[in-house]
Amino acid sequence: METGFIVVALGALVLFRLYRRGRTLIGTQPYHAGRMRTRLVSLGAVLALLLWDDWSLAHAALADAGPALATALLYMSLGIGGGAVLGVWAARLAELRWDGGVLKLRGHAWFGPAILGLYVLRLGYRFWLMHRLGLMNPGAFDPAHALGFRRELAEYVLNPVSSLLRGLVFAYYFTYYPLLMRRARALQAGVAAASPDQP
């Protein structure tokens, strides 16, 4: 009964996050530079905490953490390269326009659904990996199996595909938002220069 409730609650949370993410990625919306800056700071803090947690867990659970961390770093670097390319491409194709004195943003028709699909893929893969490693079983948290649990958790967080997808998603936003803000500043400066001086 409790397991079913947890699954339903997780499913509802995932659907709500997908709904919110879809609203911000698809369609026209007002441009908010402050919101983008807040997201960048939040993403930076989350990434720093995740990397620290991965490093700590790997050294606590694995006898020789170096190779596992090096492999995770390699795949994350590949993801960073791909995410940066996607971010540059998305920022160039995004539409910024004035509508009733308000700067509006509309992402390219393909990029919003693609990034949302990537988010779903990453989420789905993480759930599949948790299930495969037995991390979703109630017995996984038994203190008698603490060492095995830590090893499985280290394999989960340092998994090459997870590292690749993490690098791709974070690099996308770290590239897309700054480039978009630079384009918006240029537009706003152009409008300010063209407007008559106020008395």
Image (cartoon, helix red, strand yellow):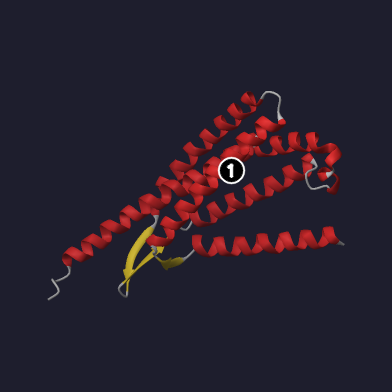
Check the picture and name the quadrant holding the C terminus: bottom left
Vertically, is 93 above or below 153?
below
Tell which of 73 and 83 is nearer to you: 73
Taking 89 as reference, is 66 left or right? right
Residue drawn where x is 56% and y is 44% of the image: 49
Q: Position of residue 193 (x, y in %)?
A: 17, 63
In which quarter of the view is residue 66 placed?
top right
Residue beneath disc 1: 50
Q: Position of residue 128 (x, y in %)?
A: 73, 45
Under mark 1, the amino acid is Leu
Residue drawn where x is 47% and y is 65% of the image: 27
Q: Position of residue 179 (x, y in %)?
A: 36, 50
**Callout 1 crowding tier (Cα within 10 Å): few <14, some 14–19, many ≥20:** few
Vertically, is 125 above or below 185?
above
Q: Secondary structure at mark 1?
A: helix
Check the picture and name the quadrant holding the N terminus: bottom right
